Amino acid sequence: MNLPKYHETFIPILEVLNSGEMLHYNELLKRVRDKYYSDLPEELLNKKTKSGDLLILNRIAWGKAYLKVGKFVQQPERAMIKITEKGKDILGKGTLTLKNLQNDSDYIAHQEAKKNEKKIVDEEINAENASPQDLIDSGFSTIEAQVKNELLDKLKEIDPYYFEKVILILLKKMGYGEFIETKKSSDGGIDGIINEDKLGLEKIYTQAKRYNENKVREKDIRNFIGAMSGDTSKGVFITTSTFDDSAAKKAREAHHTIILIDGIKLVDLMHQYGVGVQVRNTYEVKEVDEDFFEEN
């Protein structure tokens, strides 16, 4: 007997959720394990990843993540998982393979939307032709992409005012100077002011829009530029969504210097500068030191 591969947990996850009950993430993992895999040998059930997690729960968690990408399950509230109508439909057919998922229109659309980042690498990697280092790199890319996806989901859930603060924290981490949060009720389109340098010789105005699906429009950029006072000509407009063509054009043609950061670029920067993420584990890959064995 072997532990299930992550894609072999698709149907068990959907069956546990099929009652329509919304389950907490951790509760879902445990219910799937207890209902479908409790007869596995104890040594398998207690097997852990190098980071210390139970491997069986880790596999189920990855299964849930892929189902969410394909919109077979959804997350209506923080850490709460629920089956979708699409999930119920596929459950009625009785099968959902990894290949089925990869050919699904929602999965394909999700991958195409991430064109500016490395695509999630599935288990289609040819292990016979790939070197161990290739497999490590592919696995690392998979985890990195998944973390970024989850990070963007979190940003879309948090309070809009806290989102504005997150942006200022990120800019500070990127090496800019001290920042000032403007008043929430009367900022006139400005969410924060950050010093471009440590001495505060020049200022940069920021605007942060926490959108789920709506795109930032030309009107939003125009209002932002109009709210900038005469002491600066630089601004950064950040959103969790994207900018429509008219908004991008307005920013390009403005007399001010306006930098646009969409959701994909935002999570790239947060991941790079360690904002909202933490190091879970560090792995070392060693090789023989040929110089050590050379005789002088």
Image: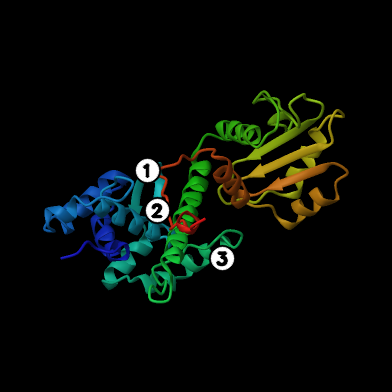
Residue 286 badge: none
Q: Which residue is mark 2?
A: 74
| Residue 24 visible | no
Q: Earlier in the sequence, mark 1 or mark 2?
A: 2
Helix, strand, or loop for circle 3? helix
Q: Quick one: label 3, few (<14), some, or many (20+) residues within 10 Å?
A: few
Q: Residue at x 38, y 74 (%)?
A: 99
Where residue 49 sits: x, y (%)?
30, 51
With respect to residue 181, does 21 lie above or below?
below
Q: Which residue is mark 3?
A: 112
Look at label 3 and name its amino acid.
Answer: Glu
Drawn side of residue 166 relative to residue 31, left or right: right
Q: Which residue is mark 1?
A: 79
Q: Earlier in the sequence, mark 2 or mark 3?
A: 2
Query: Toward which corner of the image does residue 10 lie, by quadrant?
Result: bottom left
Helix, strand, or loop for circle 2? strand
Q: Are marks 1 and 3 in contact (CB under 8 Å)?
A: no
With respect to residue 282, does 117 lie above or below?
below
Q: CA distance from mark 1 to mark 2?
A: 10 Å
Pick the front one: 232 or 72: 232
| Residue 229 visible | yes
Q: Residue at x 60, y 31 (%)?
A: 165
Q: Residue at x 58, y 34 (%)?
A: 166
Give the mark toward the camera: 1 or 2.
1
Q: Quick one: label 1, few (<14), some, or many (20+) residues within 10 Å?
A: few
Drawn side of residue 283 relative to residue 57, left or right: right
Pick the front one: 46 or 245: 46
Drawn side of residue 27 relative to residue 242, left or right: left
Colouring chosen for the image of the structure: rainbow
Q: CA distance from mark 1 to mark 3?
A: 26 Å
Helix, strand, or loop for circle 1? loop
Look at label 2 and name its amino acid.
Answer: Gln
